[in-house]
Amino acid sequence: MRILKAAATLAALAALVTGCGAVVDGTAKPAPNLKLRPLSGPTVSKVLLDGAALSRMLDQTLISRDPAQVGGPEKLYQVRRSTSQAGCLGVTAMLQKSVYRSADVQDVASESWWNNGEPAQVITVMEGVVTLPSAAQAQALFAQFSQQWQQCNGMTTSEQTGPISTTNVISDVRGTATTIAATKTATSVLPNMPALRPTPQARAIAIRSNCLVEVEVVFFGGRRSTDPGSADINSSALDIAHAMMDKVNALS
């Protein structure tokens, strides 16, 4: 009995040393308050989901047309168009340089995935991850984004790209301690032509450790419930963001 008690004590000590809070069914479970290691460098690109994972999640085939963009803050995007309501740019556009201007961005990775030309629910998915030097800095930036998104709820923005004018209606902004999501409906107009069909888009930003992940899911405006795919305007961007957060956990 003493030997068994000693073994149990040693096992408990080992769990504490290695950061494991419990052993269930023979599998060590991470302690809930275990501090995650900040991600940096080439590891950051591994947070991105691949085409196979996204295709499974949305139940439709998605393909990549270009390699992932991986690097530092120079990989953030810069709007080349005039916009109204610049304070809402973070909702209407992904990974914008001006939106992250106040932050000490370390790493950026992003990739876009496209419908393969067959009838489906989703046109494209864009995913990205941005790292800051510390989790505290990431949390502060996420809090700032959350406040900005809430202020943009119900607003309509406009932008001009050459001859094309687009209005974006922002709605259904909702947040938790680690995620913020919104729906954006974009309608574009070309000169001397009727407006194009409105395009619903789901947006999400989430935080985990020193990483902010961004997701945009663009839906076909004329999609039918019978078209292939299981994507949902209310949940798909958040589902993808949560899957990326899980990858941050696994890599930390």
Image: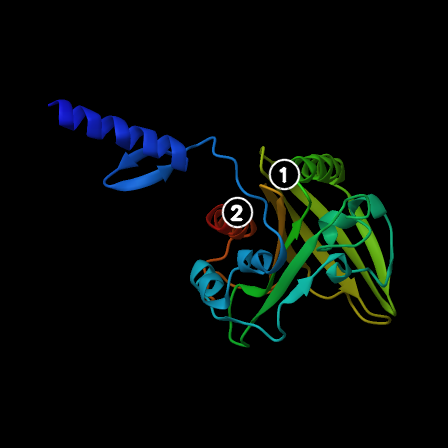
> Residue 85: horizontal and vertical position, in percent?
85, 46
> Residue 230: horizontal and vertical position, in percent?
45, 58
* Residue displayed at 10% across by 23% down: 1
Kindly identify the amino acid type of the residue bearing the numbered disc 1.
Ala
Kindly identify the amino acid type of the residue bearing the numbered disc 2.
Met
Q: Which residue is mark 1?
A: 135
Q: Answer left or right for 33 relative to 95.
A: left
Mark nearer the N terminus (2 vs 1): 1
Element at label 2: helix
The residues bearing labels 2 and 1 have C-alpha atoms spaced at a distance of 13 Å
Res. 133 in view = yes
Element at label 1: helix
On residue 245, the disc is 2
Q: Which of these two is toward me, 130 or 204?
A: 130
On residue 81, the disc is none
Q: Answer left or right for 15 relative to 61.
A: left
* Residue displayed at 77% across by 42% down: 155
Q: Within 10 angstroms of label 1, few (less than 14), some, or many (20 or more) residues?
A: many
